[in-house]
Amino acid sequence: MTSRRRGAERIVLGTAVVASVIALSGCTTQPAAAPTAVTPTAAGTSDYQTPAPTVPAPLRGDLVPEGSLTSPSLAAKIDNHEDARPQIGLERTDIVFEELVEGGLTRYVAIWQSDIPDLIGPVRSIRPMDPDILSSFGGIVAFSGGQEQFVDMMRAAPVYSAIHGQSDTESTFYRIDGRDSPHDVVVKAQELVSQHLDLAAPAQQFAYSVDTASSTAAVSGTPTSSLSLVFSDERYPSWIWDAPSAKFLRLQEGTPDLDAQGGQLSATNVVTLRVDEQYPYDAEVPMAMLVASGEAWVSTGGKTVHATWTKDAATSPIRLVDDLGATVRLAPGNTWVELVPNDGGSVTVTPGAA
């Protein structure tokens, strides 16, 4: 038999077998069913969904769902007089600037965006360096007033000025019971922000690493047990490294600095800038010169790296570079910026195991 005939027999035989099977089953032929679509699944799940995209929180650097932080930032001029402590909401800030004011005292420019409390305060009056601090953030600034020239400077900045005693703040500012004036003005923070959702979210202010271990200070810095800062004879805060919490804990004049819930204030990053102080508007009111540059230290993850800071314009963020000229990256988390005066101030970094 030739190969062609053997092939034909195989075809006939195959057809006969198929026909027999159909006859025995009593079924008629039907079109083949379309294959069932299989959805890729993650281990241990029946359905898989693509994770939502994430972006860095602009004032903290940690990853958040894209589009989740669209509200403007809220800054406030927070009192640091002994009678104003403990402050309300300070533990939930993204960034805090500490600045020298008259009488050797300090005040804070505290900024919230990632986590805005119901209530913040006590708020006090504005100072001449505050427009330079806040113009790169935009958003809202809450304060209790101030010298007319300083208020005018703040109003001229690209920030909405919410001022105690004005018609637009009647529902959001009030004097709280249990505190003496002038240390008693507080702000309904969430309500104030809700009134200005037309304002843009802040731009990112610092460069961030993906985690603490890869931050510039943690990689290249010197192990640090504490930072001791002197603003004046009246104000000399310090920070001590706390390994269990992986944060620096704050003290004021040697005493733990507590929040309104009794916890000690802390920071993932402490950025210390040496600044020149001038008196261009009032012989009693210092102004930290921030559109400038100077020496800096950045403390993160129990270590400190020496750096240089630069701010090119009021609307520009502060840039930090290490001694090799590379951009300094902070760890994701909250940041305190200490504006320590060159004249009469000092910075002491105490080595210790990280």
Image (cartoon, helix red, strand yellow):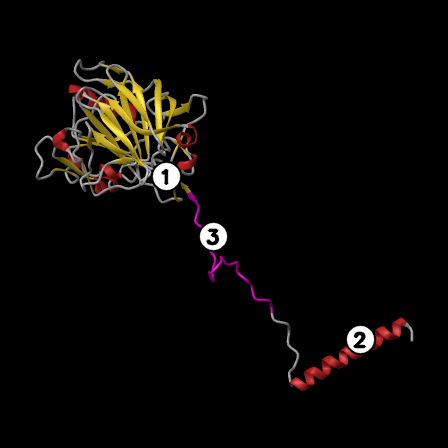
Amino acid at circle 3: Thr
Q: Which residue is mark 2?
A: 11
Camera-side residue of 296 and 311? 296
Q: What is the x, y in percent for residue 243?
A: 32, 38
Image spot of residue 132 (x, y percent):
29, 23
- x, y percent for residue 316: 36, 25
Badge 3 crowding class, 10 Å Cα cut-off, few under 14, some 14 to 19, many 20 or more, is few
Q: Compared to 218, does 235 lie above or below? A: above
| Number of residues whose C-alpha sits closer than 10 Å to that of mark 2, classed few (under 14), some (14–19) or many (20 or more) | few
The amino acid type, in three-letter code, at marker 1 is: Ala
Q: Amino acid at mark 2?
A: Ile
Left-right relation of 235 to 45: left
Image quadrant assignment for residue 172? top left
Along the horizontal axis of the image, is 126 left or right of 227? left
Label 3 to label 1: alpha-carbon separation: 21 Å
- Judge the density around disc 1: few (<14), some (14-19), many (≥20) Cα neighbours within 10 Å: many
Asked whether 256 or 1 is in front, the reply is 256
Residue displayed at 88% across by 75% down: 5
- The residue drawn where x is 28% and y is 32% is 240
Q: Considering the numbered disc 2 on the image, is that residue within a helix, a strand or a loop?
A: helix
**Going from the N terminus, do you reach mark 3 or mark 1 first?**
3
- The quadrant of the image that shows the C terminus is top left
Q: Which residues are magenta?
A: 34-54
Of pointers 2 and 3, the one earlier in the residue sequence:
2
Quadrant for residue 62, please give it. top left
Direction right: furthest residue:
1
Sequence-first tag of 2 and 1: 2
The kind of secondary structure element at disc 1 is loop
Q: Which residue is under mark 1?
A: 57
* Position of the N terminus by quadrant: bottom right
